[in-house]
Image: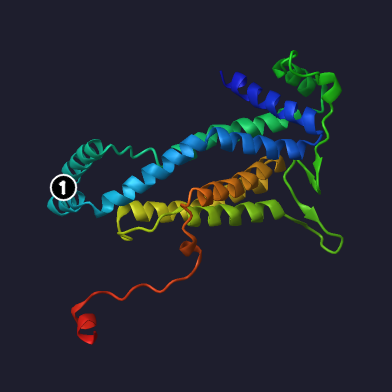
């Protein structure tokens, strides 16, 4: 089953490569295709996130939190009842992210196998290729060069005046992942609640995870990460859901305390 899944990726990548003649461009076009296919899930994620935000302001949810503050089990039961009543799926806001993981693993294996160089690797690749779609003998060996990168190896930019390579893609992937997570995080009505805390932790740890993968794995996968982040930001911007204020440092509103009221 998994080999068949990876085989689809390999054939789609090689077919695009057959059309454009550049493996880097093929990965970029493949990323756009994946983003278009998962766009309905992105819209569903937006709706799920918005419902969760609206829930924080719902009087019934506030009452439940107050009433069962010391009883986590009862609070969880009442929370699920309210979810069902309001038609909220708590997984809908993270479903596209979960779906991305098998795509990332599948793409990594597809890139490595498509860039076959040894006889054993070539034999394994031909076992995945659809003969009615591709003429593998005219494609192999693939040109793995794109800009300064070898797409089958971790990316480093080597400059003549430096004794070490600069991981440009890893840096850019980390930055773009952080920017994307910040832009796509809606403002929380309760910054101290559990949902907001989990969101902040994800915004902090996910960029470093993606950056580490970009640093250690094939640069073809890093290219996918970068293009996917850019397209993701563009999708949210088109849908009018990008929270640009999250990128700017803002002053916290003064607490509405008796002392503050007295100064008004």
Q: Is residue 21 above or below residue 256?
A: above
Comparing 216 with 207, the one in front is 207
| Residue 146 spot, x, y in % from top left | 80, 43
Q: Is residue 128 shown left or right of residue 51?
A: right
Q: Residue at x 73, y 30 (%)?
A: 16
Secondary structure of residue under mark 1? loop
Q: Is residue 66 shown left or right of residue 149?
A: left
Q: Quadrant of residue 105?
A: top right
Q: Quadrant of the N terminus?
A: top right
Q: Is residue 63 shown left or right of residue 242?
A: left
Comparing 241 with 131, the one in front is 241
Q: Is residue 10 visible?
A: yes
Comparing 219 with 239, the one in front is 239
Q: Quadrant of residue 179?
A: bottom right
The residue that mark 1 highlights is 71
| Residue 97 spot, x, y in % from top left | 48, 40
Q: Residue furthest top?
A: 132
Q: Is residue 48 above or below residue 53?
A: above
Q: Residue at x 66, y 52 (%)?
A: 170
């Amino acid at each position: 089953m998994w080999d068949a899944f990876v085989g689809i990726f390999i054939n789609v990548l090689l077919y695009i490569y057959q059309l454009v003649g550049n493996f880097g461009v093929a990965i970029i076009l493949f990323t756009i295709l994946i983003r278009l296919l998962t766009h309905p899930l992105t819209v569903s994620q937006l709706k799920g996130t918005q419902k969760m935000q609206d829930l924080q302001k719902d009087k019934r949810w506030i009452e439940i939190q107050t009433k069962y503050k010391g009883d986590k089990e009862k609070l969880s039961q009442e929370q699920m009842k309210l979810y069902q009543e309001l038609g909220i799926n708590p997984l809908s806001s993270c479903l596209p992210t979960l779906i991305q993981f098998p795509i990332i693993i599948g793409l990594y294996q597809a890139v490595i196998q498509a860039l076959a160089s040894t006889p054993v690797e070539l034999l394994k690749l031909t076992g995945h290729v659809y003969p009615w779609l591709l003429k593998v003998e005219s494609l192999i060996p693939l040109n793995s060069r794109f800009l300064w990168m070898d797409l089958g190896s971790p990316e480093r930019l080597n400059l003549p005046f430096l004794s070490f390579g600069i991981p440009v893609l890893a840096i850019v992937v980390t930055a773009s992942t952080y920017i994307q997570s910040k832009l796509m995080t809606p403002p929380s009505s309760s910054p101290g609640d559990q949902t907001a805390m989990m969101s902040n932790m994800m915004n902090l740890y996910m960029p470093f995870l993606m950056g580490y993968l970009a640093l250690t794995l094939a640069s073809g996968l890093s290219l996918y990460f970068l293009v996917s982040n850019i397209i993701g930001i563009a999708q949210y911007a088109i849908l009018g859901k990008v929270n640009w204020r999250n990128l700017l440092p803002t002053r916290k509103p003064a607490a509405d305390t008796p002392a503050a009221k007295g100064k008004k």
